[in-house]
Image: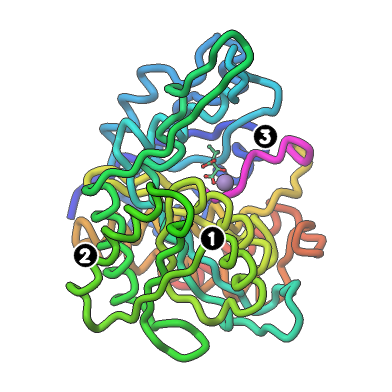
């Protein structure tokens, strides 16, 4: 347990500041007068890049590296790009992942009561799995390092290392062990999602998976190719428990999975290394709805709950773990009682949802 936890907060762009402020308020309400979190804000993102020419200032990086945890709204403005065409507003997220070695991106996909599922006949609780996205190598490792020649050739390479694959696969088995198994049959199962039938890099990923799997005889294993996976996530989402996959594939199926539970606004993520933890919703900065007060704060609120859980477990701090549980419980209540934002076909403003959550949390003290 620590006396004070330093949380580096970066609001970012678009709806980032709105959802980030909502999450901080909810965390404060969950902790009440027991609060021992020190939130400090730092600049980064596309807006900051436009103002200063810097997307991710060094002091912000140092603060994030040294903080106990990092909380982010969302980053990026389309069209605000580097000379190579890539978005400046994404530097914050991507540099943190690579420079702090945040190799495990944990993305729970869960269908909440009160939310309309776009898949027919699927009820709350029947979708409940984790996408474990490898977050430090894969195709994204080529970011800023690919080849561009004479404006007529561009190459990005997909990188897999034995140690990199092994650590993410082990994490997948550990997550499955801690889980309740797949909703459909209660089986604890790790699905290796790749394209091993076509590319060597994925065949290698699978071969490392095969070497690690026997260490976890209590967990069922299977392979699903990425193309088939997009179909299964729509047709039989209840079969899945933990899906482990390469960086880019994980990015893509995160959005697909989110769509099946009501949209990106309900998809949290936790990006973890052996020392640092970075928490933000899986969605982007949605500049089209920024400043209107209608952004969905749940994804960031749930990411902040994951932050409290991670900190609480790491530092054996029960107050933080309890606060995380309380935030998840009031989120369940809020959604089930119809506090739905525009993206969820409701008419609740972000501020009203935040207030609902905070009031319910205050009652728990
Ligand atoms: C995500 C996002 C990021 C990604 C962006 C913001 C760099 O889409 O976290 O899924 O592409 O990984
Ligand atoms: Mn994404």
Of callouts 1 and 3, the N-terminal one = 3
Looking at the picture, tell me which residue is in the foreground, 354 or 312: 312
Q: Mark 3 points at which residue?
A: 14
Asked if one can make out residue 305 in the rendered structure from this viewpoint, the answer is no
Residue at 36%, 57% (x, y): give it: 308
Q: Nearer the viewer, mark 2 or mark 3?
A: 2
Residue at 52%, 81% (x, y): give it: 239
- Label for residue 226? 1
Looking at the picture, tell me which residue is in the foreground, 134 or 45: 134
Q: Name the residue under label 2.
A: 211
Tell whether label 1 touches label 2 (CB within 8 Å): no
Vertical placement of residue 140 versus 44, above or below: below
Residue at 48%, 72% (x, y): give it: 129
How far apart marks 2 and 1 lie (CA) works out to 21 Å
Q: Tell me the element at label 3.
A: loop
Work out which quarter of the rendered image holds the N terminus and state it: bottom left
Looking at the picture, tell me which residue is in the foreground, 361 or 214: 214
How far apart marks 1 and 3 lie (CA) works out to 31 Å
Which x, y percent locates residue 348?
77, 60
Q: Residues within 10 Å of mark 3 (few under 14, many from 20)?
A: many
- Label for residue 209? none
Q: Is the magenta stretch mostly helix, strand or loop?
A: loop
Which x, y percent locates residue 42?
45, 27
Q: Which of marks 1 and 3 is in front?
A: 1
Which x, y percent locates residue 321?
32, 65
Q: Tell me the element at label 2.
A: helix
């Amino acid at each position: 347990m620590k006396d004070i936890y330093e949380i580096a907060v970066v609001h970012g762009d678009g709806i980032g500041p709105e959802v980030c402020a909502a999450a901080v308020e909810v965390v404060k309400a969950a902790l009440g007068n027991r609060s021992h979190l020190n939130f400090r804000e730092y600049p980064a993102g596309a807006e900051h890049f436009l103002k200063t020419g810097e997307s991710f200032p060094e002091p912000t990086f140092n603060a994030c590296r040294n903080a106990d945890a990092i909380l982010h709204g969302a980053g990026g403005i389309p069209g605000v790009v580097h000379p190579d065409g890539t978005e400046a507003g994404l530097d914050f997220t991507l540099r943190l992942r690579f420079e702090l070695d945040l190799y495990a991106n944990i993305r729970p996909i869960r269908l909440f009561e009160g939310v309309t599922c776009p898949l027919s006949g699927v009820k709350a609780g029947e979708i409940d799995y984790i996408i474990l996205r490898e977050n430090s190598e894969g195709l994204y490792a080529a970011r800023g390092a690919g080849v561009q020649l004479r404006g007529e050739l561009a190459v990005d390479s997909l990188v897999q290392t034995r140690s990199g694959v092994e650590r993410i696969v082990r994490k997948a088995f550990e997550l499955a062990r801690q889980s309740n198994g797949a909703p459909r049959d209660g089986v604890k199962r790790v699905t290796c999602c790749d394209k091993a039938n076509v590319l060597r890099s994925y065949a290698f990923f699978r071969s490392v998976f095969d070497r690690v799997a026997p260490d976890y005889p209590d967990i069922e294993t299977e392979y699903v190719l990425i193309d088939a996976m997009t179909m299964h996530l729509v047709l039989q989402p209840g079969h899945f428990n933990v899906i482990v996959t390469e960086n880019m594939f994980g990015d893509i199926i995160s959005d697909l999975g989110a769509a099946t539970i009501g949209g990106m606004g309900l998809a949290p993520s936790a990006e973890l290394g052996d020392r640092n933890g970075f928490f933000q919703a899986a969605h982007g900065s949605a500049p089209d709805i920024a400043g209107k007060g209608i952004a969905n704060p749940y994804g960031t609120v749930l990411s902040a709950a994951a932050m409290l859980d991670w900190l609480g477990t790491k530092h054996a701090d029960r107050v933080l773990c309890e606060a995380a549980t309380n935030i998840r419980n009031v989120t369940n209540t809020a959604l089930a009682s119809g506090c739905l934002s525009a993206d969820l076909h409701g008419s609740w403003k972000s501020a009203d949802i935040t207030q609902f959550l905070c009031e319910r949390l205050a009652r728990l003290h």
